[in-house]
Amino acid sequence: MKNTSYLLILTVIYFFSRCNDLPKKEIVIDESHLQESVVQIVEIDSVWSGHSVGFSLLTHQERQYIAYYNANRNMVVGQRDLSDERFTLFKLPSPPRDPEIPERSKRYSATQIGWDSHNSITMAVDKGGFIHLSGNMHVDPLTYFRSEKPNDIFTLKQHHTMVGPNEKRSTYPKFMHTKENELIFHYRDGGSGNGNEIYNQYNTQTMKWSRMLEVPLTDGLGLMNAYQSQPEIREDGWYHVFWVWRDTPDCSTNHDLSYMKSPDLENWFDAFDQPIKLPATLDQKSLIVDPIPPKGGIINLAAKLYLDHNQKPVFTYHKYDEKGDLQLYIAQIKKDQWMYKQITQWDYRWEFSGNGSIKGEFKIRGFNKRKDGRYEIAYWHIKYGEGIILLDENFDPIGRVMRELPLFSGHRFEKRIKTEGTFKGLKVVSSQDIGKAPEDDVRYVLKWEALDRFRDKPRPKPWPMPSKLYLYKLKRNSN
């Protein structure tokens, strides 16, 4: 009898141990009813469609500001009250980028675009209501405008310098606000593979800019440059930044996903709460999240960050697996070290390389926590289409979410809206609102049509006719 009981216990133990080896049933959550509705479309102007480049939309309180390149490739700005049915528009003058630079060195004016898809536009409003605009530059002299009256985009005036030094080879302009609502401007000084990230701060009383930091935030020491995210205030009230290093203008030479954080933009720490000294360099190994080598399958800012329940950073990003296929990975901190897990099993390699603006074949659209305590990663893949991966509380993949991604949800082209133009290759392009709508369930997007990037080189004729620029107002359906 005792032997029989003993064998029964062993059988039960063996059965449950084998259960762990059995394939687990995939969890599928159907949220297909959660969609957005288009509640308003405002026609704005005719715009350049020979190649795609980022326009700017800023909703600030009860007013909206826009900046874009019109059919003649000139920069146009506009504004409206949210209650208005149309924008009032103003074409900016076309001054030289910098009067001190020889004419033969100027590719185009400060407000006329050529063929470079890097030359997007960005805007901000300071505490006094004055409007700031920058853009149309890729390793060019700084292009910067500021309004002379509050809340009046038609009084924008060009300023050829902000601080003075390190403003002749500027790229990727970005405005941001601190926790105290102070205005910050940052940009890359130098070229791809050899540049530094410069930060300026604005004084609303003196209306002057000054260096926020005595040294660059990141420094490639002449050997590389950092493609970094903008410092973002997260749930813990700290600023968080991540980046990849790049050795040359060839985008395949990206490597070493890295990260740091700060309570005040002056004092910086690694992921393990240890202080670091600026500028951040590759030699500071505690900043490296994943030591992905060059040609290892990570491209500029191909990552999303979330903070776990301990306020520790968790990343999702892509790189090549052992077979050379591009996969999604998770990196999280366990026992004071980074741990990695592969969460996809795709049979596809995105082989990206070369200089200039390239065509994307994969994009991580979102990484967030759900109300049920689990997590989800939204993506677009050239082979596998759109999808949402469901993760459990330990960031292990357990299924998928069936939910149509919002219109204009971050990928360069929106394929669910038919183009008005018939020119071959014409696609729907969008720019997200860099401000915030007054209503929580409403957001605004700029929409137009253009051809894809062309490695920043002139495209042979024929070119498509100008397309229409629209403002879309979208409302979230939560039922």
Image (spheres, rainbow, N blue to C red):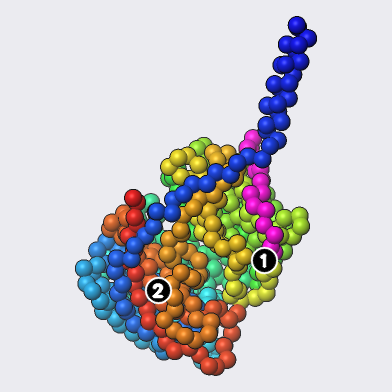
The magenta segment is 334-349
Mark carried by residue 447: 2
Identify the residue at horizontal 64%, vertical 35% (top origin).
Answer: 335
Residue 68 shown left or right of residue 216 in the figure:
left
Q: Does the magenta-highlighted stretch encompass residue 339?
A: yes
User: Does residue 283 appear in this view?
Assistant: no
Gap between marks 2 and 1, in whole Å? 27 Å
Residue 345 shown left or right of residue 479 in the figure:
right
Amino acid carrying mark 1 in the image: Trp
Residue 237 is drawn in which quadrant? top left
Identify the residue at horizontal 54%, vertical 39% (top origin).
Answer: 393
Residue 75 is drawn in which quadrant? bottom left
Give coordinates of residue 439: x percent, y percent.
28, 56
Residue 406 is drawn in which quadrant? bottom left
User: Does residue 426 appear in this view?
Assistant: yes
Q: Which residue is mark 1?
A: 350
Instruction: Compare marks 2 and 1 and give the one earlier in the sequence.
Output: 1
Give coordinates of residue 276: x percent, y percent.
59, 47
Rendered view: 298 above or below 342: below
Q: Does the magenta-highlighted stretch encompass residue 340?
A: yes
Closest to the observer, 127 or 478 = 478
Identify the residue at horizontal 53%, vertical 87% (top origin).
Answer: 107
Give coordinates of residue 102: x percent, y percent.
52, 90
* Callout 1 secondary element: loop
Amino acid carrying mark 2 in the image: Lys
Closest to the observer, 157 or 430 = 430
Q: Residue placed farthest to the left in the image?
A: 83
Closest to the observer, 300 or 404 = 404
